[in-house]
Image (cartoon, helix red, strand yellow):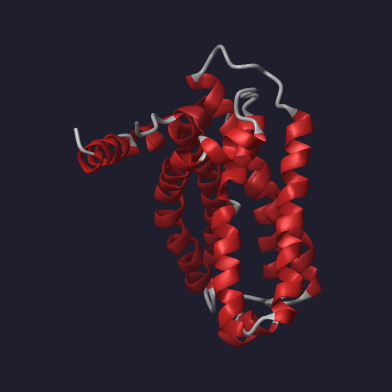
Amino acid sequence: MSVAVSAGRWLANLLKGIPGTYIDTVRLIRSFWWIPLIAALPELVQHIVEIQIGMFTSMTAFKAHSMDVARLIPGGFKVAGMWLTIFVAAVYAFRRRNPGAASRPLWGRLLVAFLINLVVALLAWPLDKLLSEAAFDIAYVLLTLLSLPLLVYFFGALFADAGMTLKQGFVRGWPRIIPMFLFAAIVFLPISPVHRLNHDWAIGAEPLRIWLLMIWDSALIGVMATGMGVGLARGYGAPVPR
């Protein structure tokens, strides 16, 4: 069998697994309803602040308050809540699909993965000063691509997969990147435009409509973060091409 045929069948099997991501997300939320709240509640807090400072009264007010400290502070908690939801959902989803998996993440490896990613991010800062804009864009893309196996290594530590060492992340991690991004993207891509539209629909609306839209939007973010975590777990455990 040619490499092209083998890769085509692998990709076709991945695409068949797309509905399973949505199904697993619904099942996870039904069993652990509190997971989406980790992201939804900080999101709602920020929306409450935005309503109180009059951000949705007009497009002018929306733009004027976009960098308001009053909304940026809860915004930090919102981002943290979203990532925490993704990680928690990923762990719970992975354990449901792999009942024999270890229950505790490999904390030491998680710290190593975090520190390496921090170093990689910091490397981009001096490059911005040393290179032209075009050269920096190319270098940034290459640096990002080369660091992708670190994502696999990080989630391997999160899932307590002792076999996914840093070396194995760069050796065996590459084929896992596509399904991880695919299954996370199929949740993110349909919901993200609705998230933006919720804000557009709220601008200039009557108070009740604004409140309903922002409550709905917060719930949507919680579901999206949960689904992305489920997708990352499914992608990590998906069969790899041989």
Instruction: Measuring from the top left, give residue 158's x and y in whole percent.
Output: 66, 31
Q: Residue furthest bottom?
A: 60
Which sits in the foreground, 47 or 171? 171
Which sits in the foreground, 48 or 95? 95
Asked whether residue 206 is in view, the answer is no
What quarter of the picture does the N terminus occupy?
top left
Asked whether residue 181 is in view, the answer is yes
User: In the displayed structure, would residue 29 be above or below residue 71?
Assistant: above
Q: Residue 13 occupies which quadrant of the picture?
A: top left
Q: Residue 103 occupies which quadrant of the picture?
A: top right
Which sits in the foreground, 182 or 223? 182
Is residue 171 toward the left or the right of residue 47 in the image? left
Residue at the spot 59% in from the left edge and 70% down from the top edge: 139
User: In the displayed structure, would residue 46 be above or below residue 170?
Assistant: below
Residue at the spot 61% in from the left edge and 88% down from the top edge: 60
Is residue 7 toward the left or the right of residue 132 in the image? left
Residue at the spot 71% in from the left edge and 21% down from the top edge: 104
Instruction: Measuring from the top left, give residue 118's x and y in whole percent.
Output: 75, 54
Instruction: Measuring from the top left, give residue 121's x and y in whole percent.
Output: 71, 60
